[in-house]
């Protein structure tokens, strides 16, 4: 009899993501500065905390409490990501951003309410909270990796974390048929691989907190697909949750932040366009492409004021220097 436990399934999903992204990750090549200590330390933290430790903590919580109860507490990841981003990773989050965090968490809780079952023991709550903190660290570290492409960092996370989780599952007595494993790998390639690459790219452009807020609306899209494909009934509480999340994203889009700030010289690689105030570098082929692209490039020291998100160029401390007037 085939027994595919949650740890084994998580391992296969991660390995499927790694397999799907391998051609893209290997084709990108490693930048000469990829071995900088800061980037290696962040990648190690992403793999250990986000890829290996957090799923184990979550699965341990699921063994102690119903899935509906655990789902409610997974909203802590959004809050933890925002708090860590603000307190330790120099990411600006204004009043609208804080209100968006509360609205998304409220909407997520409302979506989980119909499936809520029984109370959650304290041990399970602590495990879920620990898992959410691990993923919050993962989100913040990932958004600051500037030497690896999103495909490369996701490939490393999937390969290492998937191997560890699969080994743990097999050591615990799990077994599976080749067809079952193939289906899990395909699902991981299509869902985990693509979604994680998009999330990492968004985190580099928007910051960890804002990208995680948008990503947290995934539960709403899942409910919408259940309406359209499975014919499930539309519940009033789900419509209310959708309204809260839509309001949260609107507030996030309207938030503006700017002040006088200085940029130190830096060489890095990330997705960018040439119609902003930071990417005036020359291209070997002449005129830079009009569309966004990713390659290694250098920046000279610069000081200016303009509205900006907390992307890879704007992870500075706030409160120092001149204010521009649109904070």
Image: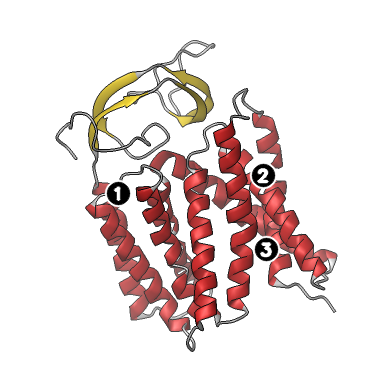
> What mark, if any, has residue 93 been given in the picture?
1
Q: Is residue 224 left or right of residue 239?
A: right
Residue located at (50% from left, 48% from top): 199
Q: Is residue 178 left or right of residue 263?
A: right
Mark 1 vs 2, N-terminal side: 1
Residue located at (14% from left, 35% from top): 325
The N terminus, quarter of image = bottom right
> Image quadrant of residue 151?
top right
Q: Nearer the viewer, mark 3 or mark 1?
A: 1
Mark 3 vs 1, N-terminal side: 3
Residue sticking out furthest to the bottom: 118
The C terminus, quarter of image = top left
Horizontal and vertical percent for residue 34?
Answer: 61, 29
Horizontal and vertical percent for residue 36?
Answer: 59, 29
Circle 2 residue: 156
Residue 214 in view: no
- Please tell me whether mark 2 sits on a helix, a strand or a loop: helix
Residue 165 in view: yes
Mark 3 vs 2, N-terminal side: 3
Give the total of numbered labels: 3
Q: Is residue 134 left or right of residue 22?
A: left
Residue located at (80% from left, 72% from top): 174
Task: Give the CA distance from mark 3 to mark 1.
Answer: 32 Å
Please tell me how crowded label 1 is: few (under 14), some (14-19), or many (20+) other residues with Cα within 10 Å.
many
Please tell me how crowded label 2 is: few (under 14), some (14-19), or many (20+) other residues with Cα within 10 Å.
many
Residue located at (76% from left, 64% from top): 168
- Please tell me whether mark 1 sits on a helix, a strand or a loop: loop
Circle 3 residue: 10
Task: Give the CA distance from mark 1 to mark 2.
Answer: 29 Å
């Amino acid at each position: 009899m085939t027994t595919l436990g949650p740890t084994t399934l998580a391992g296969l999903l991660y390995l499927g993501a790694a397999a799907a992204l391998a051609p893209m990750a290997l084709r990108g090549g490693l930048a000469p500065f990829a071995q900088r200590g800061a980037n290696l330390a962040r990648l190690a933290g992403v793999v250990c905390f986000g890829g290996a430790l957090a799923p184990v903590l979550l699965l341990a919580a699921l063994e102690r409490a119903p899935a509906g109860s655990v789902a409610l507490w997974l909203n802590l990841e959004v809050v933890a990501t925002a708090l860590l981003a603000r307190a330790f990773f120099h990411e600006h989050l204004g009043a609208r951003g804080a209100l968006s965090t509360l609205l998304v968490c409220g909407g997520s809780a409302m979506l989980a309410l119909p499936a809520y079952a029984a109370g959650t023991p304290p041990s399970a709550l602590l495990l879920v909270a620990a898992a959410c903190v691990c993923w919050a660290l993962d989100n913040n570290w990932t958004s600051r990796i500037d030497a690896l492409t999103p495909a490369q960092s996701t490939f490393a996370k999937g390969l290492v974390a998937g191997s560890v989780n699969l080994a743990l599952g097999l050591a615990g007595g799990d077994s599976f048929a080749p067809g079952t494993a193939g289906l899990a790998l395909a699902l991981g390639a299509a869902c985990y691989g693509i979604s994680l690459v998009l999330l990492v790219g968004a985190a580099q452009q928007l910051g960890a907190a804002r990208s995680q807020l948008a990503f947290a609306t995934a539960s709403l899209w899942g409910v919408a697909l259940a309406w359209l494909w499975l014919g499930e009934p539309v519940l009033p509480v789900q419509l209310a949750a959708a309204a809260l999340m839509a309001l949260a994203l609107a507030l996030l889009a309207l938030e503006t932040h700017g002040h006088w700030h200085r940029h130190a010289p830096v060489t890095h690689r990330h997705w960018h366009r040439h119609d902003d105030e930071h990417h005036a570098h020359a291209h070997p082929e002449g005129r830079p492409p009009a569309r966004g692209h990713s390659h290694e490039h250098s920046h000279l020291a610069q000081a200016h004021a303009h509205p900006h998100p907390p992307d890879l160029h704007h992870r500075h401390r706030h409160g120092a220097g001149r204010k521009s007037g649109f904070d």
